[in-house]
Image (cartoon, grey):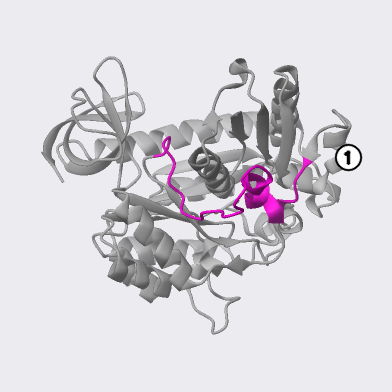
Amino acid sequence: MKFSIHTLGCKVNQSESDLIEANLKRAGWSVSDLSEQPDYSIINTCTVTAKSDYQSRQLIRRALRAGSKVIVTGCYSQLRPEEIMAIDKNIEIVDSKNKLKIANMFLKNNEISKTNISDNRSRPYLKVQDGCNFSCSYCTVPSARGKSRSIEISEATKIAEEIDASGYKEIVLTGIHLGSYGHDLNPKTNLSKLLKSLLKNTKIPRFRLSSLEISEIDSELIELLKEERICKHLHLPLQSGDNSILRRMNRMYSVEDYLSVVEFIIKNIPDISIGTDIIVGFPGEGEREFKNTKDLIELIPLTYLHIFPFSKRPNTLASKMPEQITFSIKKKRVNELKNLNYKKKIAYMKSHIGKILDIIVEQKDMNKTTIGTSANYLKVKTVLNSYPVASLIRIRISNIEKDYLVGDPVEKL
């Protein structure tokens, strides 16, 4: 049997798709492209923006045209299944809570492995948490994913040990709200205790954390980030640099809080890479509010921005707020922040010329070029390709080429 799997959205979605794919491949199924007319096509949808909804529908239609039996799951189909069924009544929708059981639909022994080892990923994800207890006024994720749920430290450690035994050099810890890890368990635990167990029980050279809220950064976690095996990289969503907009978003922190936490991090780990998310054109964001955001971004030593124009999500408070911003204004502001993002990213990249970075090899092309990711989340290119994918190598940085640092191998780790 042939199958294709297509994923939109966050790292959690990607992690779940990787698990479905890995289990089907273990059972002897072969993964293929839609052009090869697979027997089944699995679409793992996202609904974070209207564009995500559109892309999900587009993928579903492409899969139907390929003649596949189409299985749809994920946040978009969870919240608006009627829109999926309107495309074709023969589509099978799988509840998000049962997403990983998709493989069970085809496997005889009903034994689903939770070890995320994928041939197409050199830095596997380890999903340790799902769901969200927060209520941001623009977000539908809590409705689609439910309350926060964590796996036990022992289970996470066992999966990490299996990934370690397979020879991988980095694990990316992920969750819908990773910083809430362990708060729902009995007894309660937290992300720092999980990290300590992973460090103690595996030899994986690198662990990377996905997105965290600033309220989840404390002294214990900062001390752990000083460990050599924890990547010096944090993603801390800001969303807006204006306090009135943050209140409208129901973000539960102020600009001053955000600045204080970032200063605390930089003081303790000066070379860390910090990225953020920004929503542009939220209802009520006038020129003054946008300038406050832009000024704050200029001030903070961020290394990259993920910029999103505000997208009205059905049944959210923000979708019903007055003072909605026009598309043209949102587009203009997105472009302004993109220019600022480029300047900050290039400045951070230039600061690494002459330095040595360790990278996980992720791609090798026909021109004998190797591309990998550094611990501080920079893409690095080298002209030699004698190292296998997923290996860990050291590169001395000599130049910048577009969005890549360029250098030569120093030694294999």
Q: Residue 388: image x %, image y %?
A: 25, 33
Relative to 169, is 185 on the left or the right? right
- As drawn, which residue projects farthest toward the bottom? 187
Q: Residue 329: image x %, image y %?
A: 70, 31
Q: Residue 401: image x %, image y %?
A: 29, 23
Relative to 335, is 219 on the left or the right? left
Give the residue type at disc 1.
Glu
Determine whether 151 is above or below 114 in the image. Answer: below
Q: Quadrant of residue 377?
A: top left
**Residue 277 or 229: which is nearer the viewer?**
229
- As drawn, which residue projects farthest toward the front? 108
Relative to 388, is 109 on the left or the right? right
Q: Residue at x 51, y 72 (%)?
A: 152
Determine whether 207 is above or below 47 in the image. Answer: below
- As drawn, which residue projects farthest toward the left? 410
Q: Residue at x 67, y 30 (%)?
A: 40
Magenta segment range? 93-121
* Residue identifier under label 1: 82
State whether the magenta stretch is mostly helix, strand or loop: loop
**Residue 108 or 125: which is nearer the viewer?**
108
The local secondary structure at tag 1 comes to helix
Q: Judge whether residue 16 can be spotted in this image.
A: yes
Q: Residue at x 66, y 35 (%)?
A: 42
Residue 122 lies in magenta, yes or no?
A: no
Determine whether 144 is above or below 357 in the image. Answer: below
Residue 102 lies in magenta, yes or no?
A: yes
Relative to 134, is 212 on the left or the right? left
Q: Residue at x 28, y 57 (%)?
A: 204
Determine whether 94 is above or below 342 in the image. Answer: below
